[in-house]
Image (cartoon, rainbow, N blue to C red):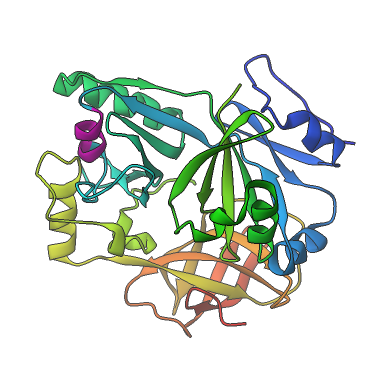
Amino acid sequence: MAHIVSAGRLRKSPFYTSTIEEGAETLLTYNNMLVPRGYGDREAEYWRLINGVSMWDVAVQRQVQLKGPDAAKLAQILCVRDLSSQVIGQGKYVAICDHNGVLINDPIAMKVADDCYWLSIGNSDIWFWARCVAGERGLDVEVSEPDVSPLAVQGPKAEDVVASLFGDWVRDLRYFWFKDTEIEGIPITVMRAGWSKQGGFELFLRDGTKGDGTNPFEVRMGKFIDLDVSDDVIGVKALRKIKQGGVKRHQLGIVLEGGEENEDQSIWLDIVKDGAVIGHMTHKAWSYRMQRMIGYALVSVEAQPGDRVEVMKDAGPVTGQLSPIPFAV
C-alpha cells in the first residue's frame, strides 16, 4: 500500500487511482503532481522494460502550449534548433537555453497546428519563461498549460501493445512524430517517443538535476543544436562562443566498484582523478545486467572512457571507471 503525505497544492493525475490499484509503493512530487517511482520489485520492473513492456503514469510531464499568430515565432525564439521545416504532426528534440547558453530544459517541440505548438515534458519554469519572453517581445501568442496527460508505454513489446489498441498504423510512426486518435471516444495523441532505449510510445490523454550551469554540448545534445539560426533565438550567440572556444566538459558513464546501494536518487558528488577534482557524478542507479552501480559523470574533456577515478562519497571514496555511453554490457 502506498503511503503518501500530501499537500493541498499537489495535483493527482487522471491515472492516479489505477496507479495505486496496480500496487505503486513509492511516489515522488514533480510539477506539483505525484509520479509513481516504484511498484515494490525494482528488478522485475527493470527486466519487464528490457524484455517486455512497461507502462508508467508520467502525467507530471506537463505540456506548455504556444497558441496564436506568433506561436511559430515564439517557438523558434525559445528553441536552439531550426524549426522552419517542421510540419504538423512532427516533434523535434530541442534545447531551451537562457541568454548565457545555459540549458534550461530539453523538451520535444511538437507542431500541433500552424498556430499551435506544445513543448512536451515542460515544467512550470518553462511556462513562466515562455510567457515572459512572449511579453518582452510583444508577440501575439497565448502561453498556457493544456489539459494533456501523457502515459508512457516502453519496452520491445510496446509497439505490439499500442498497435492492438489503436491499429497497425502506429507501426509507421517515425520517432517523435505523432497523430491524434481516440479510444472509446476518449481523445488521445499517440507519439513514438520515450525515455528508454527499448522503444516505445507516449499516449497523451487530451481530457481532463540539480543544475550546474550545464550547456547542451556538455550533455550529448550537440547534434540537436543549430548554430545558424537567427540571432533572435535565445542563447544561440552564447552557444556559438562556447563552441568556438571549445567545450570544457562532457558527459560520460561511470561504473562503480562494490555492491548495490539502497538509495537511488540524484546526487552531485566530486569525481577525483590523480588527486584532482575533474567533475561530478550527477546520477546513479543499479544495473541488473552489469551487476554494478552505474551513473552519469559530467567531467573535464581531458577525462576519457577507461580512466580510473574515485567518487568522493560521505562514507569515503569509491573507486570507479569512466565509461562510454551507452554502457558496454
- Residue toward you, 221 or 161: 161
- Residue toward you, 32 or 301: 32
Residue lying furthest left: 231
Q: Is any part of residue 322 visible from this angle?
A: yes
In this picture, which residue range is highlighted in magenta?
A: 71-77
Dominant secondary structure of the magenta stretch? Answer: helix
Residue lying furthest right: 1
Residue 53 against residue 299 in the figure, above or below = above
Give me the residue at 71% from left, 76% from top: 289
Residue 134 in picture, x, y percent from top left: 23, 23
Residue 100: quadrant of the picture: top left
- The quarter of the image holding the C terminus is bottom right
**Image check: 223 left or right of 59?**
left
Residue 177 in picture, x, y percent from top left: 43, 51
Give me the residue at 50% from left, 77% from top: 322
75 magenta-colored: yes
- The quarter of the image holding the N terminus is top right
280 magenta-colored: no
Residue 152 in picture, x, y percent from top left: 62, 47
Residue lying furthest bottom: 306
**Image check: 207 left or right of 291?**
left
Residue 33 in picture, x, y percent from top left: 62, 28
**Image check: 89 left or right of 238?**
right
Residue 11 against residue 329 in the figure, above or below = above
Give me the residue at 32% from left, 55% from top: 216
Residue 188: quadrant of the picture: top right
Q: Is any part of residue 195 visible from this angle?
A: no
Number of numbered tags placed on the structure image: 0
Give me the residue at 54% from left, 54% from top: 169
